[in-house]
Image: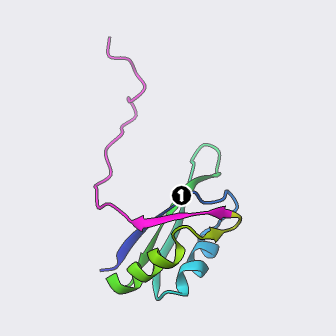
C-alpha cells in the first residue's frame, strides 16, 4: 500500500495532471487528486497524492513542501489516516 500525502495551498488552476507531474520527479505516483467543490466545480485549494512507498513519499514531502507550484507556495505533509465522517443530509437542520 502507498503512502498518502496532503498537499495544501494549491492554486485554483492546479489540475490532477499537474499535481501528478510535480510529484513524479520523486518516484512512482499511484494517484493524484485535487479536491473539487461539488457546487461550484472549482478547486478547494488542496489535494492528495499517493506514492508507491514511504521513502518516495518522504522524498516528495521534503522536495515539494515550501516550493512553488502554479504560482503558489504549497504545503506538503503526511496525510492523517482518519476515516471520512458521515456528514449526512440533515447537518444544516436545526435541532429544535
28 and 26: which one is in front? Answer: 26
Residue at x-position 60% and y-position 43%: 39
Which residue ends up furthest to the top in the rendered image?
Answer: 96
Q: Is residue 80 left or right of residue 36?
A: left
Locate residue 31, reporting x and y percent.
47, 76
Q: Relative to 46, say whether 26 is above or below.
A: below
| Rendered-image quadrant of the N terminus | bottom left
Quick check: is 87 in the magenta stretch? yes
| Rendered-image quadrant of the C terminus | top left
Q: Is residue 53 visible?
A: no
User: Most prominent secondary structure in the magenta stretch?
Assistant: loop
Q: Is residue 46 left or right of residue 87?
A: right
Highlighted magenta segment, given as a residue range: 72-96
Residue at x-position 46% and y-position 76%: 62
Residue at x-position 64% and y-position 69%: 68
Kindly identify which residue carries mark 1: 46
Q: Quadrant of residue 66?
A: bottom right
| Residue count near mark 1 (Cα–Cα under 10 Å), binned few <14, some 14–19, many ≥20 | many
Q: Is residue 16 left or right of residue 59?
A: right
Amino acid at each position: 500500500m502507498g503512502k498518502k500525502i496532503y498537499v495544501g495551498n494549491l492554486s485554483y488552476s492546479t489540475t490532477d495532471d499537474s499535481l501528478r507531474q510535480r510529484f513524479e520527479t520523486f518516484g512512482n505516483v499511484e494517484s493524484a487528486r485535487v479536491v473539487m467543490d461539488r457546487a461550484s466545480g472549482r478547486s478547494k485549494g488542496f489535494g492528495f497524492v499517493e506514492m508507491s512507498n514511504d521513502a518516495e513519499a518522504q522524498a516528495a514531502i521534503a522536495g515539494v513542501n515550501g516550493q512553488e507550484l502554479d504560482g503558489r507556495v504549497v504545503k506538503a505533509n503526511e496525510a492523517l489516516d482518519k476515516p471520512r465522517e458521515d456528514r449526512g443530509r440533515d447537518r444544516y437542520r436545526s435541532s429544535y
